[in-house]
Image (cartoon, rainbow, N blue to C red):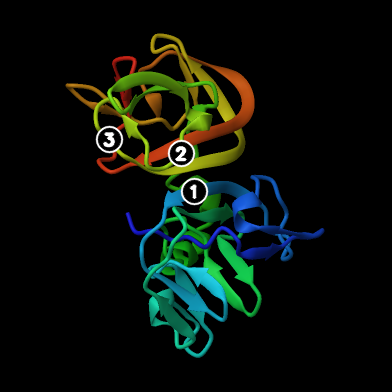
Amino acid sequence: GKKKCFDGNTVINLKRGVKTMQDLNPGDILEDDSRVTATMKCLAPKKMYSIKKIIVTAEHPVLDVETNFYIPASEHKDSVLISDYIPHFVYCISTSSKRIKIGDYTFSDWDELDYMDRDELLRYGTSLKEQCLINGGLSQNTRLPMKIGTIIRDIRIANIIPGMNLKNGSKILATIKTEPLDTYEYIQQQIEGSENLVFKTKEDILHGGEKMSKKYIGKQSLYHIITNNGIIKFKNITL
């Protein structure tokens, strides 16, 4: 998907103090009282844009105050192209308000819903939290088979970084950490994760682990990865 991220050194004002974008954690409270619900780390593109020293990806939506519509950062009147961006990673957050305020500018977070969608959902009383496309994941101790050179090694999902490759050849484009969420043990699959995991079998796609035996084990921060082909394979499981 399109990257909607910032330079890691982007300064974010918190309710108490400041942090850089790369140092934010789920649960941090921002200056406008919104809460960081998840953090994302992505492979950086070669081209970025600077909006009054806020370095951001081309596609990241920023509010155009003249029209009151969100537009890609690359189209903002204050944007300047950076054609030789050097850092390997860029970062973003998901927030409870679905907005990120930085200085005089308001950006969307990385949730894929656009603002017309959000306005519609709110009008009909649907929770934004329920509509986040990535509102879940696997427990931090989940081990995935990674290909490092010619070696296959099981690595905890919490330690995986963008650019690594899964055993099946999928490339990791982004990693995500959530705030503590309801977590379940999937009995037969012997994995732990959110209730909304989507399993792919030869016969069917099972949304939310339907037809699968699972038990609630409490709340914990969960981890998710985005791959270039949308598939995560491990332990004879395909997600």
Q: Please name the residue that numbered disc 2 is placed on.
A: 161
User: In percent of the image, x 49 and y 67: which residue is there?
Assistant: 119
Relative to 113, does residue 131 appear above or below in the rendering?
above
The reply to whether callout 1 and callout 2 are in contact (CB within 8 Å) is yes
Question: Can you see residue 187?
Answer: yes
Question: Can you see residue 127?
Answer: no
Please identify the quarter of the rendering in which residue 77 is found.
bottom left
In this view, the residue farthest toward the left is 203
At label 1, which amino acid type do we have?
Answer: Lys
Viewer-closest of 189 and 77? 77
At label 2, which amino acid type do we have?
Answer: Ile
User: In percent of the image, x 37 and y 36: which residue is there?
Assistant: 164
Q: Please name the residue that numbered disc 3 is placed on.
A: 170
Crowd band around label 2 with a 10 angstrom C-alpha radius: few (<14), some (14–19), many (20+): some
Please identify the quarter of the rendering in which residue 74 is found.
bottom left
Relative to 162, does residue 145 appear above or below in the rendering?
above
Relative to 215, does residue 193 appear above or below in the rendering?
below
Rendering coords of residue 154 (x, y %): 41, 19
What is the C-alpha distance between the residues marked 2 and 3? Answer: 13 Å
At label 3, which amino acid type do we have?
Answer: Ser
Which of the two labelled residues, at mark 1 and mark 2, occupies the earlier sequence position? Answer: 1
Q: Please name the residue that numbered disc 1 is placed on.
A: 41
Q: Is residue 201 left or right of residue 124?
A: left
Crowd band around label 3 with a 10 angstrom C-alpha radius: few (<14), some (14–19), many (20+): many
| Labels 1, 2: front one | 2
**Which SS class for mark 3?**
loop
Rendering coords of residue 68 (x, y %): 50, 83
What is the C-alpha distance between the residues marked 3 and 1? Answer: 17 Å
User: In percent of the image, x 51 and y 34: which residue is there?
Assistant: 223
